[in-house]
Image (spheres, helix red, strand yellow):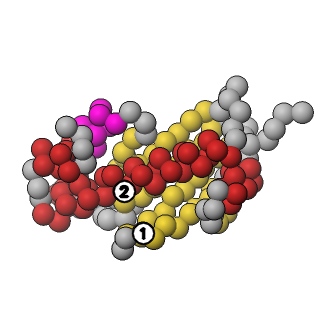
Amino acid sequence: MNQIYDIHFIMTALQEAGWQPTQTDNYWLLIPIEVSQKAFFISFYCQDEHKMLSVKGNIPVLVPEEKEAIILEFINYANYRIPVGSLELDINSRQVYFRIGMFFENVQLNPQLVHNLTQEVYQGVQDFWLSITTILAEGIALEDAFQQANLN
C-alpha cells in the first residue's frame, strides 16, 4: 500500500523533531517562531493528491511601495546566488518570504526530510532578515546588503 503524505504526516514528522505545529486547515500548518527578539512563522502547504510540499518563512516587516523596487532587486540578486530555496515578495501581505517547494512524485518523504526542509527555511529567514530590514529602515546600498547576507 502507498504511503499517504498529507498534512497529518507532516505534522507528525514535525512533532517528532521537536517542533510545535498548529494545523489551520486540511492543507496548512503553522509553526510560530521566537528567537533573538525576532518573531516569525514557518508555514507548510501539503497536498498528497498533487504530490506537492511547500515550506516558507516570513520576514514580518511590511515593504512599502516606495521600497518595492530596491527589495525586488535584492531578491532577484539573492535568488541568483542561493543554491536552495528562494525569496519572494507577497504582493498581498507586502512581506518577504523564504520558500522551498518540492514535488514528491516518486520521492519518499520521511521525517528527516521534513525536518531538514524546516531547518533550511528557518535558516533562510535568519540569513536574510537583517539585510531586508536594514534596506527598509536605513536604505543601505544593495552592495552592502549583499555583503551582509554573504551573497558576494
Residue 23, horizontal then vertical, whole percent: 67, 63
Residue at horizontal 50 percent and vertical 51 percent from the top: 119
Q: Amino acid at mark 2?
A: Gln
Viewer-proximal residue among 96 and 9: 9
Horizontal and vertical percent position of residue 15? 68, 60
The label number, if any, that marks residue 35 in the structure image:
1
- Is disc 2 placed on a helix, strand or loop? helix
Classify the position of the C terminus by image quarter: top left
Which residue is tagged 2?
Answer: 126
- The residue under label 1 is which amino acid type? Val
Q: Earlier in the sequence, mark 2 or mark 1?
A: 1
Please report the residue visible at 49 percent of the width from the left and 63 percent of the height from the top: 41
The answer to whether residue 7 shows anywhere in this view is no
> Which region shows up in magenta?
74-82
- Farthest residue in the bottom direction? 37
Residue at x-position 90% and y-position 33%: 1
Up-down relation of residue 49 to residue 133 (above or below): above
For marks 2 and 1, give the CA distance: 10 Å
Judge left or right: residue 49 versus residue 79: right
Tally of marks = 2
Residues at circles 2 and 1 in contact by the CB criterion of under 8 Å: yes
